[in-house]
Every structure is written in structure tokens, then in C-alpha cells.
Image (tube, rainbow, N blue to C red):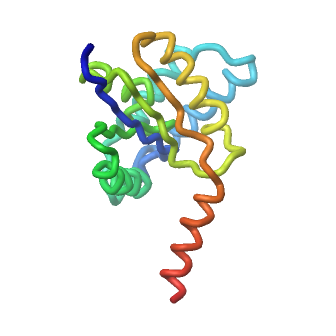
Amino acid sequence: MGRTKKAVILVGHGAPAADCPRELVTRLKALEGRRAASGGGPPSPEEREVEAKVRAWPRTPENDPYRAGIERLAAELAPLLDGAELLVAYNEFCAPTLAEAVATAVQRGADEIAVIPSMTTPGGVHSEVEIPEAIARLRAEHPSVALRYAWPFDLSAVARLLAAQLARDLA
């Protein structure tokens, strides 16, 4: 029996780059809203095209400090993962998508993938609805891969993290 290869995917919310044309982002949100109002379903070709442009917009720490922050978090997290490969994905506005990150992990030989969001509290549509729905689709696409969602977080552990930060910063 072969050795299990593990990967972890850190999913951030994502944000449009500051210099991405506002009309492009507005058009994407309008197309998403129209689709949601009509009961969902797959994105139209126009929505996929506009989304691809927004996600592929060139990123720098100056025009996308959110992405830079997630990448710094990933750099801190990676050495703590006991050899599992760490990939980063974004829920919206930024590449790669969760599906793209899973495909990369599978291509690199991962047969166990844990998905962990950067969102820490319950109640958000991304962590409670969109990511679980995406994971369900990805499990169907990759039936030989153990795909797990490491959420919801233990809120007492999150509270201890925040209290430790406060103690450090207010000391």
C-alpha cells in the first residue's frame, strides 16, 4: 500500500485588485446577482469571462494587500503542517479558485486534502454555504481523494488566540 500524500488548501475570501477597473467588478457582481435572482444555476459564458478577467488581474502587495496577507499567513502556516503541501485558493475575485487548487494538489499526487478557510466565525455565506457546496462538487469530481473541510473552528480556541494577541499588544 502506498504512502498517503497530504495537502492543505487555505481558502481566503479574495478581493478585487485596487487597480482593476470598477466597471469590470460591477459587471461581475451584476451578472452574479442576476443568476442568483433567477434561481442559481451555472454561470453564463459572459459571467465566466468577466470573472476570469477579475481573478487574473495582476496582483502586487500594493494593489491587493488582502492577497499579500493571506500569502503571509500561508508562509507562517506551511512549516506547521507536518510535511503536507500547502496551497492557497480564493473564494472570489482572485485566482486560483478552490477547484483549481484541488486540481493542482491532485495533479501533484495528493490523495488527502484538507480545506481550511481564513474566515473564523460562523454565519458567513462563504464558509457555511459556498465552500461546502464547492467541496461536494469536488468530491464527485475526485472520488479517489479524501477531501475534508476543517471547519467550523473551535471558537474557544479562536477566543484564546485573540486574547493572546490583545495581551501582547496591550502589555
Vertical position of residue 148 compared to residue 39: above or below? below
Q: Residue at x 43, y 36 (%)?
A: 54
Q: Residue at x 64, y 14 (%)?
A: 41
128 on left or right of 72: right
In the rendered image of this protein, does residue 19 appear above or below residue 35?
below
Residue at the limit of the structure toward the bottom, as seen here: 171
* Quadrant for the N terminus in the image: top left
The location of residue 138, given as percent across then percent down, is 48, 18
Residue, x 54% and y 24% (percent of image)?
A: 134
Query: Along the horizontal axis of the image, is 107 left or right of 8?
Result: left
Q: Nearer the viewer, residue 45 or 100?
A: 100
131, above or below 15, in the image: above
**Quadrant of residue 28 within the rendered picture:** top right
- What residue lies at 65% left-to-right and 51% top-to-bottom? 121
> Left or right: where does residue 119 sit relative to residue 77?
right
| Residue 150 image offset from top left, x and y in percent | 53, 38
> Residue 31: where, in percent of width, then height?
61, 26
**Camera-side residue: 14 or 168?**
168
State left or right for residue 76 relative to residue 93. left
